[in-house]
Image (cartoon, grey):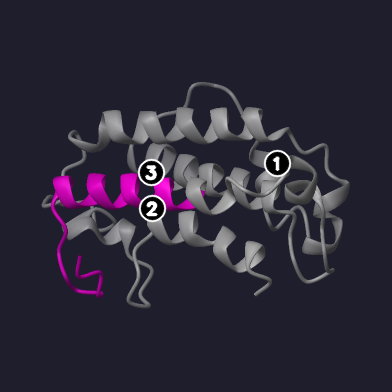
Amino acid sequence: MDLHVGRRLDVDQIRRLLEEDRAHTMRLLSPVSEDDQRVQHDALMRPIIWDLGHIAHFEEVWLLENIGKSRDGSEGLHGMYNPAENPRRTRAELPLPGVQECVAYMSGVREAVLDRLDGFDIMGEEPLLDGGFVFSDGASTRIPAQRDDSPDSAAEGR
């Protein structure tokens, strides 16, 4: 799929992209033990489990709250996954959830995004939704699919 900036995406393309990238993330991490996902191997890296939660946090904030205007009254795991509140060097000290809990959080947020995707007017007046713009980071990749790919760098030592 052409993911270059300026290429408009329709709802079906966005849905497919989100589903493909989540499957890629889960395949990438399937051989990594829970202990290894919790370790901060270097001060410049984050624990992989933190990255997974941050993916869901990013989607929840941008797609459900800012665009979907949806708040269920729960802070969820916002504070823990807010990079401004938790610098890299301290993230391994956070009370990070287990892999199953984190994957459940990711799944719940993604399900809510997919449920609401048809209701997003991507050709309407909202600048962040125009042609799927909120799914674009200005650097020839799409968000939040790019966020789903972010564990690649941690798992591969980048």
Q: Which residue has dot 2 on it?
A: 21
- Residue 154: where, in percent of width, then height? 65, 64
Q: Nearer the viewer, mark 3 or mark 2?
A: 2
Please tell me which of labels 1 and 2 falls first in the chain.
2
Residue depicted at 85% across the width and 63% down the height = 89
Q: Which residue has dot 1 on it?
A: 79
- Residue 77: where, in percent of width, then height? 65, 35
| Pick the front one: 65 or 9 | 9
Amino acid type for the residue under numbered disc 3: Leu
Q: CA distance from mark 1 to mark 3?
A: 18 Å
* Label 1–label 3 contact, CB within 8 A: no
Q: Is residue 97 magenta?
A: no
Secondary element type, mark 1: helix
Secondary element type, mark 2: helix
Q: Which residue has dot 3 on it?
A: 63
- Residue 141: where, in percent of width, then height? 35, 70
Secondary element type, mark 3: helix
- Residue 129: where, in percent of width, then height? 24, 53
